[in-house]
């Protein structure tokens, strides 16, 4: 019995709100270990172990702060940090985020993107990336797809990220 329990925890646990955006390439979730109010170091370790066991090799953090980045280093998991603390900062970083995601996906990496929670900002970046990468054709389609995929209504920040990206591409 003891070996069964040990092996179960050795494989880790799936991060909360984990959803594939592009199957086997790009997924989103809340921050491994939980949000600021419920973050636990042990849970973070278990979720990072799960990510590694599932073949993830890149984490993209959109958090304002560098929380968790040291934990990714400890587990030899590559990461990129794009702090999107305001829409103005987001606009200047979006093209870099899209290019980084695209390079990783084309290189067959498995990428997890997160913020503290599965936020409006994450949803907006996902929808905008899908337009930028020509997987979707326009803002209206991206908004519908992201809301259905992530099972959450997109708010004004996410909608603005998507529409701004779509307008810049036209």
Image (spheres, rainbow, N blue to C red):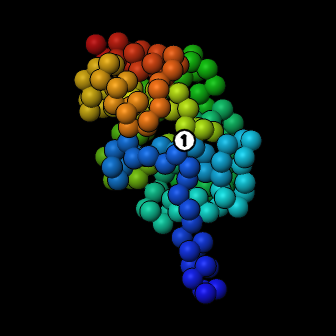
- Secondary structure at badge 1 equals strand
163 up-or-down from 46: above or below: above
Asked whether the viewer can see residue 103, the reply is no
How many numbered marks have been drawn onto this rendered protein structure? 1
Which one is in front, 49 or 155? 155
- Examine the image and state in which quarter residue 130 appears: top left
- Examine the image and state in which quarter residue 22 appears: top left
Residue 126: image location, x then y, percent:
42, 33
Taking the spot 53% from the left edge, 63% from the top edge, the residue there is 50
Residue 21: image location, x then y, percent:
38, 42
Which residue is labeled 1 in the image?
Answer: 114
Query: Would you call the spot at circle 1 few (<14 residues within 10 Å), some (14-19), or many (20 or more)?
Result: many
Residue 53: image location, x then y, percent:
48, 66
Taking the spot 56% from the left edge, 79% from the top edge, the residue there is 7
Q: Is residue 29 left or right of residue 102?
A: right
Asked whether the viewer can see residue 102, the reply is yes
98 up-or-down from 106: above or below: above
Quarter of the image with the C terminus is: top left
Which one is in front, 22 or 74? 22
Taking the spot 54% from the left edge, 41% from the top edge, the residue there is 114
Taking the spot 52% from the left edge, 46% from the top edge, the residue there is 17
23 up-or-down from 166: above or below: below
- Examine the image and state in which quarter residue 142 appears: top left
Quarter of the image with the N terminus is: bottom right
37 up-or-down from 96: above or below: below
């Amino acid at each position: 019995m003891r070996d069964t329990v040990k092996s179960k925890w050795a494989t880790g646990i799936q991060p909360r709100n984990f959803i594939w955006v592009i199957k086997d390439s790009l997924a989103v979730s809340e921050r491994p270990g939980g949000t600021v109010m419920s973050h636990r170091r042990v849970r973070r370790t278990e979720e990072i172990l799960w990510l590694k066991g599932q073949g993830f090799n890149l984490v993209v953090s959109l958090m304002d702060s560098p929380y968790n980045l040291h934990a990714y280093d400890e587990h030899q998991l590559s990461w990129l940090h794009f702090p999107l603390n305001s829409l103005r900062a987001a606009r200047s970083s979006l093209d870099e985020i899209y290019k980084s995601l695209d390079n990783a996906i084309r290189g067959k990496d498995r990428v997890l993107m997160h913020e503290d929670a599965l936020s409006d900002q994450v949803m907006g970046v996902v929808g905008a990336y899908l337009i930028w990468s020509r997987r979707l054709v326009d803002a209206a389609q991206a908004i519908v797809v992201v809301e259905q995929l992530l099972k959450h209504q997109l708010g004004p920040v996410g909608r603005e990220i998507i529409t701004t990206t779509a307008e810049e591409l036209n």
